[in-house]
Structure formats: structure tokens, C-alpha cells
Amino acid sequence: MATETCKHCGHTRSPAEEETAPAWACPACGKKYYEKPKQKSLVAAVYDAMFVTAPERWPLTSKCKACREKVSREADVCPHCGHSNPYQPPTLKPFSEATTAEKTGVLLVSGLVIVVFASALHFGRLQQNSGPQNSPVDGSVYQVKAYLQNHLRDPDSYQPISWSKIRRENGANVVAHRYRSKNGFGGYVIEERTFVLDDSGTVISISP
């Protein structure tokens, strides 16, 4: 840890104090000599993703800071007036300065993200603790995917293509699944299998 000087009393921590004193407090006056960084809230993080653009995604051109003519993002000197570093990055407002409309939009998106995540988590738990069901998101069947991950030659190569709706036959649950995976030679092949599961979700048979 780098040596810090207290902004309240001017005390500089000694090497011994670096090892023994609390990380955030001055050993002389006991006050915090700098504030612990605050973690971003989900809403602020969503705002950054929606409105605060990373430098590599800035527009290719802007108006020169001096003459307001169009210049390239890569320009070192304005070709119109000779001003150095003429490119003007887009204005990046912190969340605290966002407009009411922007904040409302961010809150709606954040709420949607939470609802989708919670629904997916809830459905995943239901699938693990109940009989086989088609996912409302992609039609997949959790127990079949888990079976394939444990039995395919190369589980990492598994790519689902399509699922049928689960149907009841002779007291069991039947679902057809088409997927792509690597064979023993390292090439991708497409397989279509029909899986039969009992009511606990255990795969009891597979037919080609």
C-alpha cells in the first residue's frame, strides 16, 4: 500500500503504521484520510451502458474545438485552422446530471433486466426441482441439456438447434431435440434424437 498523508492533520503514515493501522483511518487523528470508493448501483451501471460511450466508440468525426469545422477523430492538427488535438469528444454526463427522461428510461430498462433475470432464475430452479418442462425462453429442456453435457464426446461443442414440445406417451415424457456437436474426428455433425424422461426428469431412453 502506498504511503498516505492525512488531509485533516497532515500526518504521514510510517511503514509500521502501514502494516498495523486501519486501511481507511489516520493513526494520528483517527479520521478518514480518503473515502473508500463507492460501488456503482445497478441503475448507474445501466445508465453508463446506455449513454456513456467508450472512447473507441466515439464518432469518427467531430467539430474542431477552435474553428468548429469537421475534423477526423484521428487528426492531430485541424486541416482548417491548424489547432492541435482538434477532436472534441462527446459530452459524457454523470448519472446525477441525467435528464428526467433519461433516468426514467434507465429505471425501466433496469427493472426489465431484473424481471428477466429473476424469471430465468426462478424457472431454472423449478426445472431442477420438478419434472421436465420446456423453457419459455428457448423451448429447451434442462434435464436433456444436462444429460448431453455429461455424455457427449465434446460437451463444449454442443449447440442446440431446435426442441419439440414435451408430449406424454405411455406414462413418460417425450421430447425431440436437434443439435450440433463434434464427432470423434473433430468435425461438427447434426444429430436428431428423441429423449424419453420419467416424471422426475431422468432420461430413461434415447432413440435416433
Image: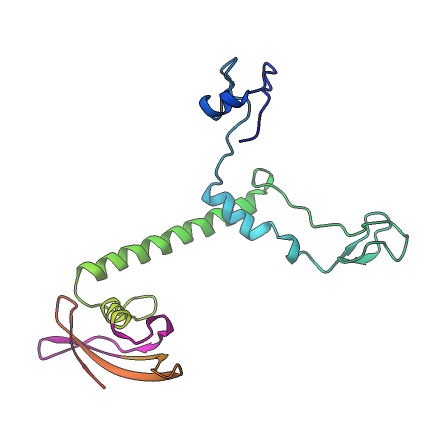
Q: Does the magenta portion include 168?
A: yes
Q: Residue at x 34, y 82 (%)?
A: 184
The vertical placement of 77 against 43, above or below, is below
Q: Position of residue 63 (x, y in %)?
A: 79, 53
Q: Nearer the viewer, residue 178 or 17?
A: 17
How many numbered circles does the render carry?
Answer: 0
Q: Residue at x 47, y 46 (%)?
A: 107
Specify the segment rendered in magenta.
Answer: 151-176
**In this image, 48 relative to 187: left or right?**
right
Residue, far bottom: 208
> Residue 143 placed where, x, y %?
22, 68
Can residue 22 be seen in this snapshot?
no
Quarter of the picture containing the C terminus is bottom left
Residue ID at (57%, 37%): 96
Q: Is residue 117 left or right of residue 194?
A: right
Q: Quadrant of residue 61?
A: bottom right
Residue 30 lies, with reference to residue 208, above or below; the image says: above
In the picture, measured across the screen, residue 174 lies left or right of residue 120, that is left
Q: Residue furthest left?
A: 171
Q: Is residue 171 visible?
A: yes
- In front here: 31 or 98? 31
Up-down relation of residue 59 to residue 105 (above or below): below
